[in-house]
Amino acid sequence: AQSVTQLDSQVPVFEEAPVELRCNYSSSVSVYLFWYVQYPNQGLQLLLKYLSGSTLVKGINGFEAEFNKSQTSFHLRKPSVHISDTAEYFCAVSGHQGGKLIFGQGTELSVKP
Amino acid sequence: NAGVMQNPRHLVRRRGQEARLRCSPMKGHSHVYWYRQLPEEGLKFMVYLQKENIIDESGMPKERFSAEFPKEGPSILRIQQVVRGDSAAYFCASSPNTGFANTEAFFGQGTRLTVV
């Protein structure tokens, strides 16, 4: 079985400041890792994913995430946030066979001017 | 290429009524997933379907909920005799195949069900 824990439910940050959204996972098998963003009243949009290879993954909108196998973490970072980054962010895992995604509880990022 | 289309976007039902949620996957996608998002919670997997087959329904409540993905037409998530606890956002996602190595699951905008 797999599980995902997002350690912060809310992260307030000022515009142009750096941000890190934390994600830890648990799995007995190898997994793929994902970050999705959800804007208000919208569906989910894929930010980035880790499949294999380089542990630093770059995604859209200037986000990146680093896979750390020993710490079973996949933290999302952005060096300078914008007001428009205000949204809910979800970390997710799937097995290599695909199928369902297992989501964390979400982190609400609030960027203030 | 239109994205994943879900309708209706908002649905209000009285307790005891039936709710039918529709999902049209992206063109060329034969895999559909349904997720439920309760207030202040993340998305919970409900069911994974391919055309005419249920592949994984481990997240479906045992009673009142059913899903189908017929050969023709959209996937349907059906909730019978709705209760207030069914109020949630229901999201559908689709993908062209089962693995995410070379693709991704694309999400619809969701159906927000309110039971009064």
Image (cartoon, rainbow, N blue to C red):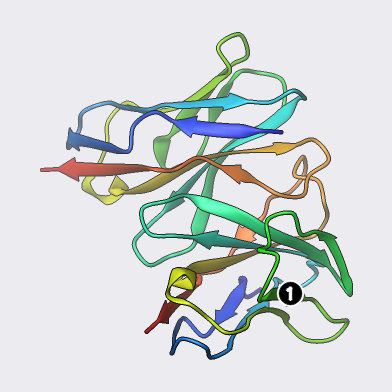
Task: Tell me the crowding category of disc 1: few under 14, some 14 to 19, or many 20 or more residues within 10 angstroms, Cα based.
Answer: many
Instruction: Please determine whether, in this image, residue B28 is positioned above or below residue A91.
Output: below
Q: Amino acid at mark 1?
A: Ala
Q: Which part of the image, by quadrant, shows the C terminus of chain A?
A: top left
Q: Secondary structure at mark 1?
A: strand
Residue A10: give x, y in percent of width and height.
27, 39
Q: Chain of mark 1?
A: B
Residue A34: give x, y in percent of width and height.
58, 38
Q: Which part of the image, by quadrant, shows the N terminus of chain A?
A: top right
Q: Nearer the viewer, residue A17 or A3?
A: A3
* Residue picked out by circle 1: B67
Query: In the image, is A108 to the left or to the right of A83?
Result: right
Query: Residue at the spot x=61%, y=71% of the render?
Result: B3
Query: Residue at the spot x=75%, y=44% of the render?
Result: B100
Q: Nearer the viewer, residue A18 or B37?
A: B37
Query: Residue at the spot x=89%, y=75% of the render?
Result: B52
Query: In the image, is B34 to the left or to the right of A13?
Result: right
Hey, which quadrant is residue A72 in on the image?
Answer: top right
Q: Nearer the viewer, residue B21 or A20?
A: B21
Residue A98: give x, y in percent of width and height.
78, 44
Query: Residue at the spot x=69%, y=26% of the render?
Result: A27
Query: In the image, is B95 to the left or to the right of A20?
Result: right
Hey, which quadrant is residue A7 in on the image?
Answer: top left
